[in-house]
Amino acid sequence: MRRLTVVAVIAVLGISVLPGTAAAAKLGPAPVVADCLGYRGPSQCIYNIGFIEMRLSSHIVHVGEKLTAQFNWGLTPTRGALPLLFGAGLSKAKCSGLPKVIALGSTGAGTCTWKATAATPGWQTSLGINLSQNASLGSYTENDFYTVIGKQSAIEGWVRREDSASKKAGYRPGIPNIQVKINGPKFGRSIRTNENGYFFTTVQKAGAYRVTPVLPKKYKAGKSNAVAIDPESKVVHVSGSDVGSAEFKVRDGIKVTATPSRTAVPADGQQGVTVDITAERFGDPLPDGSTLSIVPNKESAGANPQTVPVPARYCNQFGVAWPTGDRATNMFQAPFPVYTDAKGHATMSLQTGTVPGKLSFYAWARDASGSLETDSINDARAEVTIDNQSTGSGDPRAIGKPLGAVAKEKNLANPGSIYSLRDLLVANAGANPGLGGLAFAVVYGSQMYGVLAMPQTERIEPAADGTIPGSAGSTVIPAEYLDGLLGKLYGGPTASGWNAFWPTVLGGAMPAPPPFASFAAGSTDGSTTGWSLTPQNGKVTSEGGFKALGYPYAAVAGGC
């Protein structure tokens, strides 16, 4: 699977147009790196495999010149490798740091050198490294290609996409079918790059040659090549004992856009925002299954969800993706992935918390290893900003009267549970001055339950076990008040029990719930004696998210 993933990124379509000289025609099309199981082109096909690599210093060498190879490997305990060191037209290899058999699970690097002793009839692909795996996976070979020519001068080169993850040259994708103009002493020719962006030609005279790729409009970022390619052209010097080489980097045409369904929401902990993302390269959608990284805190590779300025819960297509786990053991969390469909489209969602402020995050194009696909980072990423707005500066200790007024004015249906009571409060907090500026969350435990009300501007930091510490600015609607409220708020009065409470609610007044600190201490005006937010009795519900984030929230439509 790894092999197919890597080569799928590298294999691109295009047909190489060969130089017109007789010597070049005998060589035929240069080999290409592709998924050789599906490749049907005219060239020899070779693989690139992610955890082993062999790269040659040149693809065209003259008789008498040296050819060098760099080997690199990093293997799992079930994998070994065997260097392939014998090639036509070459002397016996002299190697340094390269064992004859590469051990299972080892990591290392080595070099080998050959002397070109005789011209070859065409391209050779025998040098490389063979990967041996367990019986179920078989073995695979990564090769590189070369040819040995006589005294004829030659030019070779690449037109590749820029890529900051290109320390291994064979992994940087080439641009296919690009016209390359070569002009020198009594010589002028246009050739085209092959599927991997490689080009070559032989020339009749030694001297200086100017090599200039000509980019189609879709690859250009401006009116001239200079904007899109580096360098715009290059002069190379060739002789009968030298091969001129020219490499060009095309500025990556990747573009990521991200559009949120809303850019401003009330900071009540109940708001969901969906984000539509599109990613394209040179105007074409990124392939199906391409990886986009969502960086919740925008600038850092990893963040502490408990201390980010404006917390939120993020989801990809698989559910809650950031943050995850337990806050006691998962203090820092890395960006999470979303994946494009065949149209280069992806969707994610987030749910804002109760801490007001502007939260920003990046949607960023990445390669399979998690590295940047491009140096042009302003094009490769899109920034999304959501304003989590406070709705006021309400006082949670005076919640009774405005709640009663809401019940009378709206004639709302019986909420039926602590969750629907919380939703009732949230729905009316923005419009009612007495409830505005408050955040509401359900708290529960083995011996108690209730609804926690707090100022939106207050960030409650739960303890490592998920319990909520005392807070002078917060209020709990405890079970004793809550039971009566749920049972009687919208029903008719009865002759006993909460009879005395019911007319008070309809009149627009409700006893103010006790302050949080008093409730947590277990002794207030007598109505909450024995109830306290002890470790087993008062965790904030996370409902599938990171346990006790420091702000309450629950699953909502458009959230996660």
Image (tube, helix red, strand yellow):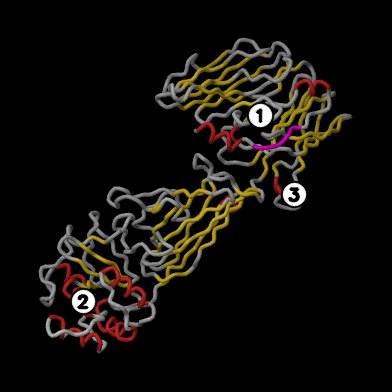
Q: What residue type is labelled 3?
A: Lys
In this image, 204 relative to 363: left or right?
Answer: right
Query: How far apart are the alpha carbons under marks 1 and 3?
Result: 25 Å
Assign a secondary structure to mark 1. strand
- Position in image of residue 184 (x %, y %): 84, 31
101 on left or right of 221? left
Residues at circles 2 and 3 in contact by the CB criterion of under 8 Å: no
Quickly name the residue at label 1: 32
Amino acid carrying label 1: it is Val
Q: Residue 39 placed where, x, y %?
A: 64, 31
Kindly identify which numbered label has been placed on residue 217.
3
- Disc 1 + disc 2, Cβ < 8 Å: no
Q: What residue type is labelled 2?
A: Gly
Q: Is residue 304 left or right of residue 149?
A: left
Q: Residue at x 75, y 37 (%)?
A: 234
Q: Using the numbered discs, state the Cα–Cα distance from disc 2 to disc 3 in whole angstroms.
A: 71 Å
Instruction: Quickly name the residue at label 2.
Output: 487
Residue 201 x %, y %: 78, 27
Residue 344, magenta (yes or no):
no
As for residue 13 lying within the magenta part, the answer is: yes
Residue at the image point whose x is 66% and y is 45% from the top = 251
Q: Which of marks 1 and 2 is in front?
A: 2
Task: Specify start and end residues of the magenta stretch as a single range.
Answer: 12-16
